[in-house]
Image (cartoon, rainbow, N blue to C red):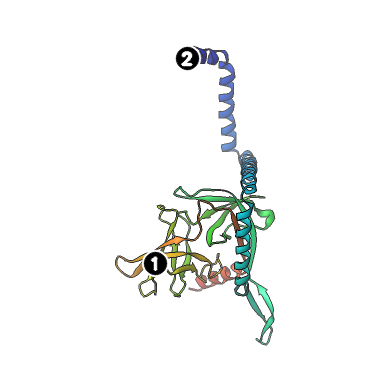
Amino acid sequence: MNKVWIFFEKNAYLLLFLLLQSIALSRVIRHNYFQSYLWFTASNYAVGNLHKMVFDIREYFSLKSQNQILQRENATLRNALNTELLPETNNKGFVNDTVRKQVYIYQEANVLYSTYNLQNNYMIINRGSVHGIKPGMAIITPFGVAGITKDVDTHYSTALTVLHSKFSISCRPINSYNFGSLTWNGKNYRYAQLIDLPKQTHIRNGDTVVTDVRSLIFPEGIPVGIVKSYRLRDPGDFIEAQVELFTDFSSINQVYVIDFLEKKAIENLKLLINENK
């Protein structure tokens, strides 16, 4: 105890200087936009590089399993290729089957950091604005839906995962065209909830849940999970289903970021509809 007291006594002025310097620095950052921006950019860059270093070490010891995941993902993308192209039409209205327009662009990325045991969970990926990433892009794993990009830096981006209170997308049972909203109640990271399904929806335990065409973020038909149970919610007009997620967020690693090229055009049409109401 005496040694601790002697240390503080000898270094009192230095410790006081460091304390006052820290307070002054925090006030400058908090109340000045330019300094705050510099601090945010520098800290993001440092944290991103730190997570990248950890990721590189972890990836080195899991190359075999990652190659297997990549092979599975490539097969999935090839199978889905025809659903991601729209036929172009000429001025006479005839469809030219040999000329098609790409609707979605997939870009691979690695998860440098992620959480799954919080009320609102995020991930950091090694893709940013220089790679064409923008807020609101879909993120999937080789197994299914993962999240949506949120904050985009130059080389890195954050994303809300399915395990976030603000995450919500249109989904449906694979054998039905009735759709609901996929949300998370904050309890078990292996399960999400498909809510607001009309009570006439054809649904059974074991059904696969996929993304719906009404989602302006995810392509239609991306796997989400399997229905484990369902019930009518009071007053009985809607069904809520418990969905076991295909993506295991405790071991998420490789992902794909999806850019929906027609999103802006559809959003503009929706704005016109709302303006004409």
Under tag 1, what secondary structure? Answer: strand
Mark whose residue sits in front, 1 or 2 = 2
Residue 217 in the image, given as x and y percentages of width and height: 55, 64
Q: Residue at x 53, y 51 (%)?
A: 251
Depth order, front residue of 32/117: 117
Q: Whole-Å distance between the Cαs marked 1 and 2?
A: 63 Å
Instruction: Single out the residue that lies furthest toward the front.
Output: 64
Residue 202 in the image, given as x and y percentages of width and height: 39, 75
Q: Amino acid at mark 2?
A: Met
Circle on res. 171: none
Q: Residue at x 67, y 58 (%)?
A: 132
Residue position for label 1: 196
Q: Residue at x 52, y 54 (%)?
A: 160
Q: Amino acid at mark 1?
A: Asp
The answer to whether residue 36 is left or right of residue 276 is: right
**For residue 261, above or below residue 11:** below
Instruction: Single out the residue that lies furthest toward the left.
Output: 235
Residue 169 in the image, given as x and y percentages of width and height: 49, 63
Do residues under tags 1 and 2 come within 8 Å of each other at their CB atoms?
A: no
Under tag 2, what secondary structure? Answer: loop
Asked where in the image residue 254 lies, by quadrant, the reply is bottom right
Numbered label tally: 2
**For residue 15, above or below residue 180:** above
Q: Residue at x 62, y 40 (%)?
A: 43
The answer to whether residue 180 is left or right of residue 37 is: left
* Precedes in sequence: disc 1 or disc 2: 2
| Neighbours of disc 1 within 10 Å: few (<14), some (14-19), many (20+) | some
Residue 3 in the image, given as x and y percentages of width and height: 52, 13
| Neighbours of disc 2 within 10 Å: few (<14), some (14-19), many (20+) | few
Residue position for label 2: 1
